[in-house]
Image: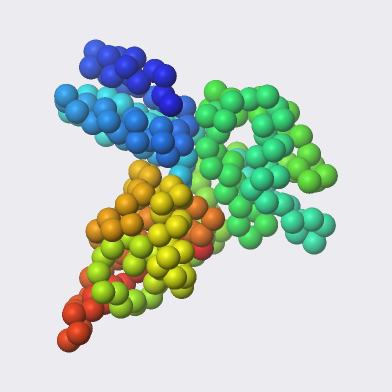
């Protein structure tokens, strides 16, 4: 829970540009409640599909912030998978052993034997200098500007046919699981749409929304192609695993 939500509201109304630390999905829902009374909330986590993000709250007529305004330091390292596979939990455990708060760093992005960390600029120097070994490997992190395109999770585009745009239907079809399993995932709070948790299995999905499914990946409906003679909807979707 965001204990300073009221402070953020008052400070932004006074004309200040408020920058939060990294927020989880529940906190994102809370901060988005400040999109009112002439205020606007912007979210960014260091890359487009980030789940943990920093928020900027400011007067709506101010110029929109740039990525640099979120003060996120990105660090990268490579590891030897032949020695030992490193997972998200291993990296998280090593970072937390430093005794720092979870809201000082964002996503831990691991792909193709490469690890990216997204840190608040304020804590980044201390964290990198004191980073302990991860799974008995001493890794050297270096600061970078962005995630390399060839290291991003690749989007697989495909056409699907569905009877409706219900959330459980879309997830089941894209992930090749049953609707009952999709409903279970949704109702457990493991699905977010544009960073907001959605537990409504009958929610009607829309074009270009980012549907994130914890431990499964992300889905975006790219285009509504046509409707078949049997009234089934043909969609072009992008799926990230």
Q: Is residue 204 left or right of residue 76?
A: left
- Residue that sits furthest to the bottom in the current view: 229
Q: Is residue 120 above or below residue 112?
A: above
Does residue 62 appear in the picture of this structure?
A: no
Residue 52 % position (x, y): 47, 40
Q: Is residue 43 above or below residue 166?
A: above
Looking at the picture, tell me which residue is in the foreground, 6 or 64.
Answer: 6
Q: Residue at x 26, y 27 (%)?
A: 34
Q: Residue at x 25, y 69 (%)?
A: 164
Looking at the rendering, in which quadrant would you find the N terminus? top left
Q: Residue at x 55, y 33 (%)?
A: 105
Q: Is residue 105 above or below residue 212?
A: above
Looking at the picture, tell me which residue is in the foreground, 177 or 193.
Answer: 177
Q: Residue at x 68, y 43 (%)?
A: 91
Residue 84 % position (x, y): 79, 56
Q: Is residue 142 left or right of residue 138?
A: left
Residue 74 % position (x, y): 55, 39
């Amino acid at each position: 829970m965001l204990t300073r939500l009221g402070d953020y509201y008052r400070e932004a109304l006074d004309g200040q540009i408020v920058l939060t630390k990294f927020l989880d999905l529940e906190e994102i829902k809370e901060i988005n409640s400040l999109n009112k009374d002439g205020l606007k909330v912007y979210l960014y986590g260091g890359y487009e599909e980030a789940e943990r993000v920093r928020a900027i709250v400011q007067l709506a007529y101010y110029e929109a912030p740039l990525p640099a305004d979120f003060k996120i330091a990105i660090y990268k390292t490579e590891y030897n998978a032949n020695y030992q596979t490193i997972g998200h939990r291993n990296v998280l455990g090593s970072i937390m052993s430093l005794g720092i708060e979870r809201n000082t760093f964002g996503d831990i992005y691991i792909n193709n034997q490469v690890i990216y960390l997204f840190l608040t600029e304020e804590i980044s120097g201390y964290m990198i200098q004191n980073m302990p070994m991860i799974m008995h490997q001493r890794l050297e992190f270096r600061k970078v500007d962005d995630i390399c395109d060839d290291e991003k999770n690749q989007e697989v585009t495909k056409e699907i046919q569905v009877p409706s745009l219900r959330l459980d239907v879309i997830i089941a079809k894209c992930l090749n699981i049953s609707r009952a399993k999709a409903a279970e995932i949704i109702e457990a709070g493991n699905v977010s749409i544009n960073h907001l948790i959605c537990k409504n299995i009958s929610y009607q999905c829309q074009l270009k929304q980012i549907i994130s499914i914890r431990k499964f990946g992300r889905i975006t409906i790219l285009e509504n192609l046509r409707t078949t003679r049997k009234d089934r909807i043909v969609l072009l979707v992008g799926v990230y695993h």
